[in-house]
Image (cartoon, coloured by chain):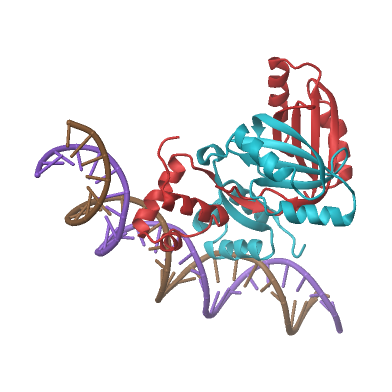
Chain colours: A red, B cyan, C purple, D brown
Amino acid sequence: MSARLDRIDLKMLRLLQNNGRLSNAELAETVAISPATCHRRTQRLFEDGFIAAVRAMVAPKKVAKGTLVMVGVVLDRSTPESFAIFEQAIAKLKFVLDCHLVAGDFDYFLKIRVGDMEDFNRIHGEQLIALPGVRQTRTFFVMKEVVDNAPLEF
Amino acid sequence: MSARLDRIDLKMLRLLQNNGRLSNAELAETVAISPATCHRRTQRLFEDGFIAAVRAMVAPKKVAKGTLVMVGVVLDRSTPESFAIFEQAIAKLKFVLDCHLVAGDFDYFLKIRVGDMEDFNRIHGEQLIALPGVRQTRTFFVMKEVVDNAPLEF
DNA sequence: GCAGACATGGAAGAAACTTCCGTATTCTGA
DNA sequence: TCAGAATACGGAAGTTTCTTCCATGTCTGC
């Protein structure tokens, strides 16, 4: 963690998190500094890695990805090699939004977006259980997305 | 779903998803249309809800939110009222990134970001198990974030 | 108190945004 | 098939914004 953030930096981060298309001029006015200074500060936030990226959030339902599924995965063996091979394989599956190694009854938790249940069924049979070292999976269909991908509070 | 998306729209969506700060001029050149047309198309993508928002992705570790926890929640009763009350309460908890009603052994799945385990312990004791109608929770500490919040493929 | 490092805002040339408008293409119904 | 309407397109131009340079101001450690 290179530099520290003052109150203005934090405010800028929060504003850009809520609206990544804010112009430098608008941002500068909102946080009450000059456009030049604001521009330099924003650059620093990117260079120092405080902002990893700026992303347009595409509405899943609009692009036929309206079905969300959580999947718990248990591997055959809990060796570092098994984990590494599994992780390498799952990184190639583009429908996997999250993949986390967890402590508890499962080895991994997956968050997956597909078009519909039929779509998931096919993917589950053809790709998920075929992943290297998978002993079993437990599927949790999401029936209602109460909160999805909320902005970070800090 | 109002209008349909042609090949150019899809390309624009993918480009903006990967880099929400692309200027209209750059975007126009990449998809080989005029800046004016590109501007109008982009506007339409927003107006018709294909792009829900543009967000700066703040690096969690940089703002003391480096610890990720998945939590399964079971409620006392599975009535619509119980669900509604629970959902209303959880929407106020800002450290909850995801909250999904699921089918399976749990009622809800939560994705939570905190500073560290101690932080979570306090939150768990003071806020999670105190939520209305919660019978039990099961905590899965994330030991490694293999993939987190990957961009949507479509 | 001083020297160095750093942050700030004004200014200006360059670039981009946004809108208007005339033309071209597509769609629809007869 | 064709005419009329609706839609989409790109060029142009005024306005805004970006980006950089520079002089001034502020903070720190010696």
- Residue B110 rendering spot, x and y as whole percentages: 74, 42
Q: Quadrant of the N terminus of chain A?
A: top left
- Residue B134 rendering spot, x and y as whole percentages: 81, 45
Front-lying residue, A6 or A66: A6
- Residue drawn at 39 percent across, 61 percent down: A32
Is residue B42 left or right of A137 when viewed as pictured? left
- Residue B128 rendering spot, x and y as whole percentages: 72, 44
| Residue A91 makes an appearance in the image | no
Q: State whether residue A94 is above or below residue A11.
A: above
Is residue A9 left or right of B140 when viewed as pictured? left
Counting labels gives 0
- Residue drawn at 56 percent across, 63 percent down: B39
- Residue B127 rendering spot, x and y as whole percentages: 69, 45
Front-lying residue, A74 or A126: A74
Q: State whether residue B7 is above or below residue D2.
A: above
Front-lying residue, B83 or C26: B83
Q: State whether residue A140 is above or below residue A137.
A: below
**Rendered image quadrant of residue C14:** bottom left
Q: State whether residue B116 is above or below residue A152.
A: above
Is residue B130 left or right of B121 when viewed as pictured? right
| Residue A118 makes an appearance in the image | yes
Front-lying residue, A153 or C21: A153
